[in-house]
Image (cartoon, rainbow, N blue to C red):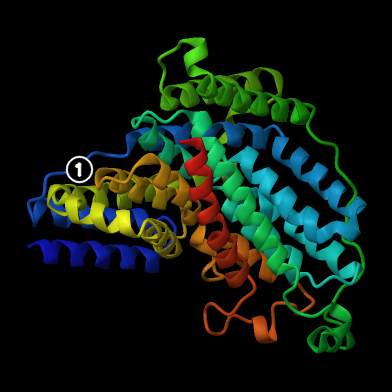
Amino acid sequence: MVWLHFIFLFAIIIYAAKLGGIGVGMAGGLGMAVAVFIFGIPPGPMPLDVILIIMSVLFACSVMHVAGGMDYMIRVASHILRSNPKYINILAPAIAFTLTIFSGTGFTTMAILNVVQEVAKQNGVRPSQPLTSAVVASQIAISASPISAATAAMYVVVEKMGVSFGDALMVILPAGLFGAAVASLISAFQGVDLAKDPIFQQRMKEGLVSMTSKEELEKPLPKGAKLSVGLFLLGVLFIVLMLLFKQEIGHTLGSRDIIVITMLFISMLMYWFCDVKLTKIKESTIFHGGYESLVVILGICWFASTVIEIYVPSIKEQATVLLGQYPGLLALAFFCVSALLFSQGATSALLVPVAASLGCDAPMILACFVAVSGIFVTNVYPTSAFAVSCDDTGSYMGKWSGSFVINHPFFLPGCLGLAAAIPFGFLLASIVF
């Protein structure tokens, strides 16, 4: 029965990857039904802590979005890019990384991609270079953000191992930043300049490339936009400080309770002082996307933990020896599953508890954690697909068309970035711990 159960587990994961999006959670529900009602496996623990954290953070982000805070942050980022066009290959990934770190979601990056491609082509820079670096940087930044779903799922586990939030951040934040920097450097050298690109020249002759600025007149922001950003960032700062100085403050609250309470309270403050209409919150695109992520994590992670948990005692000894000899295997598992599920949060919630139950210690988990960012393997993830679609110069065409699934500009920078970040993470973990 062991092989049958694990074959079924992998079949459901592959089917979930084929469905994508909210279908991943539905596939998990299918797996749970078969596992419990046909195979007779008792249900495993639900990932409730992770779901509650994600729910509260996404709700606060939705309120800030309705208040105009997201628009304000994007407007500031756009001004920086347009004011410093010569440094587009540096600023684009830096801004994408920063936006993701503070918002906890990479989808904020999509709002600046049109500006990135416009500034790039008007200055003779191949748009695929800064677009790629921005997308990959935002994807890697998820593993370094203190409030992302992936980090929340990971820290809920390592916190029980006695790891402080400060120690965790001292590993994952520099490792993610280093990986994003390496990826950005690689992407800056991919492909020739537009002046030497025959595809671009041909598209110019055919009138398929617009070289005029599409910058629109700035509409006035809601009066509470700036304040909502300030309140949200104060909330993030409060969470970080409460977790960093837990011993000094002397409280016994866990990360789940601190994050949920703070995010709900900050949402209330934004409602009071930022002119937020309650009926508009549920219409936010962040709110809709967030519900999808909750279903994904509930379905697939609950199913996987249900099947794996009953076999943990029998495989723990062998897995411990194997991972002790080849610790990089954990990073490989993170990478492969994230490439399948297209979700850092789902990968973290799925595999980090499994890794802990198999005897992986906290330093190993933290060092390998950046590898949950393997969603760039194919170019169909929303941020990647949007970067390709918004570029009219043809810089993603020809050699970079992705006709063989992985021959696209995101693959090499992303892989090399993670290949550099993982050993750097082990170095940091050895110093911190």
Q: Nearer the viewer, residue 272 or 202?
A: 202
Q: Residue at x 91, y 67 (%)?
A: 123
Amino acid type indicated by mark 1: Gly
Q: Residue 15's x, y, as percent?
A: 32, 67
Judging by the rendered image, the residue that carries numbered circle 1 is 44
Q: Is residue 196 above or below residue 298?
A: below
- In the rendered image, the vertical position of residue 200 relative to residue 100, given as above or below: below
**31 with respect to 99 (left or right):** left
Residue under the image location 74 percent in, 48 percent down: 95
- Residue 295 seen in render: no
Quarter that holds the N terminus: bottom left
Look at the picture and state if 14 lies above or below 32.
Answer: below
Residue 42 figure quarter: top left
Q: Position of residue 312 (x, y in %)?
A: 17, 49
Could you tell whether 344 is left or right of 305 in the image? right
- Furthest-top residue in this view: 250
Question: Front-most of 283 and 187?
Answer: 187
Please say if 176 is above or below 61.
below
